[in-house]
Image (spheres, rainbow, N blue to C red):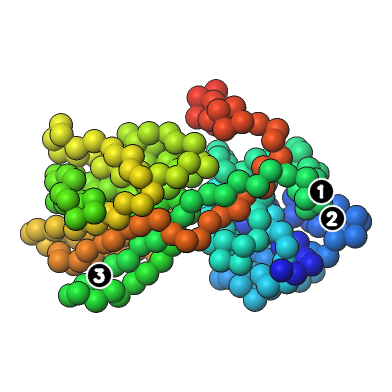
Amino acid sequence: MGDRVLLCPNPYRDVDLDVTLYVQDLLEKHGYKTYICPIFDEVEDSAIPENIEKHRLRDVIDEAFFVVAIGGDGTILHCGKCAAIHKVPVIGINAGTKGFMAILEKSNADQVLRAVSGDYLEERRMMLDVSLIRDGEIIMENSAINDIVVNGFGDCIGLTAWCDGDKMTKYFGDGAVFATPTGSSAYSLSAGGPLVEPTAQDIIFTPICVHGMSAKSFVLSPDRILSARAECHYGKQAFMKVDGSDLIELENDDIIKVKKSNLELIMANLGQKSFYDIAFEKLIEGY
């Protein structure tokens, strides 16, 4: 683990990097070394001030002991996987909309000093591993902080799901979400799934817009292995996304296998708000 704090802004949320530069100045005045690592490698140069020296997160993560994500939840997801692999803690400053995972707002961004000094509670967030199996071979593997989504993007598809080899459900609908407790407050919740404490150890399976009355959400033990097969007919297509990544087109006989990952996202919690405070503020009071 290194000696630097990595500042990972979404330059489309933190316009002109105002928050990022404020945090950088604050940290460096207190003796910390920093790197600015915009979360998009392909970010337009016009979105970042010309005098900013930027780095690629994956190139400098070995030199870091802390990551500060500045944007929305997508910003945390984007840099969180790399941080999880290297066991570097993350704290989020919300410069987006809901920012459910970010515990700081722009108005109290100075609290980052507490976090980097070690004055925080460590929250270990469960992650999921996903494998895509085609013709008996694994053709893709990935890990998710939030969720793995299978759907037809407007087309009704068939979906069969198994838990440890036992058939769990079968239905026609828009697809399904395999979510972590952290991801339970995202797409899974919108699809009718339960809200689960982010530090819990569960796998959440939530059907999306089912054409029927029988398919419901499941909350499963972390040692379960889930499998699913999406079926498309009459030229329709099904796709998979991992934490909102690029679409992966599925074929009819593809099997998606999901299990608990050995990776964990370490989030820094300053103890200012409970999970219930955040849920009320972000999901109820804000409407």
In the picture, measured across the screen, residue 81 lies left or right of residue 50, that is left
Marks 3 and 2 sit apart, C-alpha to C-alpha, by: 46 Å
> Quarter-wise, where is residue 247 in the image?
bottom left
Marks 1 and 2 sit apart, C-alpha to C-alpha, by: 7 Å
Give the amino acid at mark 2. Answer: Leu
Instruction: Give me the residue at 38% from left, 33% from top.
Output: 194
In the displayed image of the protein, which residue is found farthest to the front?
Answer: 223
**Disc 1 crowd, CA 10 A, few/some/many (<14, 14-19, 20+):** some
Vertical side of 15 occupied by 98: above or below: above
Residue identifier under label 1: 113
Instruction: Give me the residue at 15% from left, 38% from top.
Output: 211
Residue identifier under label 2: 27
Q: Which mark is residue 237?
A: none
At numbered mark 3, what does the secondary structure look like: helix, strand or loop?
A: strand
Residue identifier under label 3: 133
Tally the marks.
Answer: 3
At numbered mark 2, what does the secondary structure look like: helix, strand or loop?
A: helix
Nearer to us of marks 3 and 2 is 3
At numbered mark 1, what does the secondary structure look like: helix, strand or loop?
A: helix
**Disc 3 crowd, CA 10 A, few/some/many (<14, 14-19, 20+):** some
